[in-house]
Image (spheres, grey):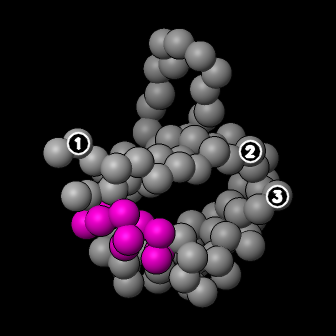
């Protein structure tokens, strides 16, 4: 079953966040990430929103978790921490 990273972000330090985006490419490539939504216009209809929303598809929950816990992603993540307000979750796809 496919799994998805869903990230909701408000960037507070664009330069640091840009470094995260650049550095995370290696991990996403290694683990077969497929970006379904990356930024783009948002129309918040209910609840509290963030300015940047990202949906990334992986072939499985195991791949999604392996990507997150990989050395490559954790090195990239170090640039993101403190560069914004971030919510990140992994969601199983529908059967």
Magenta highlight range: 58-67
The x and y percentages for residue 42 are 47, 28
Q: Give the residue pinned by disc 2.
A: 85
Q: Residue at x 47, y 82 (%)?
A: 26
Dominant secondary structure (helix, strand or loop) of the stretch shown in magenta: helix
Q: Is residue 15 visible?
A: no
Q: Which residue is mark 3?
A: 82
Give the mark count. 3
Closer to us: 78 or 88:
88
Q: Secondary structure at mark 3?
A: loop
Q: Would residue 65 be counted in the magenta stretch? A: yes
As drawn, the label of residue 94 is: 1
Q: Are discs 1 and 2 less than 8 Å apart at CB?
A: no
Farthest residue to the right: give it.
Answer: 82
The quarter of the rendered structure image containing the C terminus is: top left
Q: CA distance from mark 1 to mark 2?
A: 28 Å
């Amino acid at each position: 079953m496919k799994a998805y990273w869903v990230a909701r972000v408000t960037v507070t330090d664009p330069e640091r966040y840009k470094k995260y985006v650049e550095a995370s490419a290696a991990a996403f490539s290694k683990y077969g990430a497929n970006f379904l939504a990356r930024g783009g216009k948002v129309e918040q209809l209910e609840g509290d929103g963030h300015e940047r929303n990202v949906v990334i598809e992986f072939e499985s929950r195991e791949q999604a978790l392996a990507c997150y816990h990989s050395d490559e992603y954790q090195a990239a993540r170090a640039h993101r921490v403190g560069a914004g307000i971030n919510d990140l979750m992994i969601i199983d796809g529908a059967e």
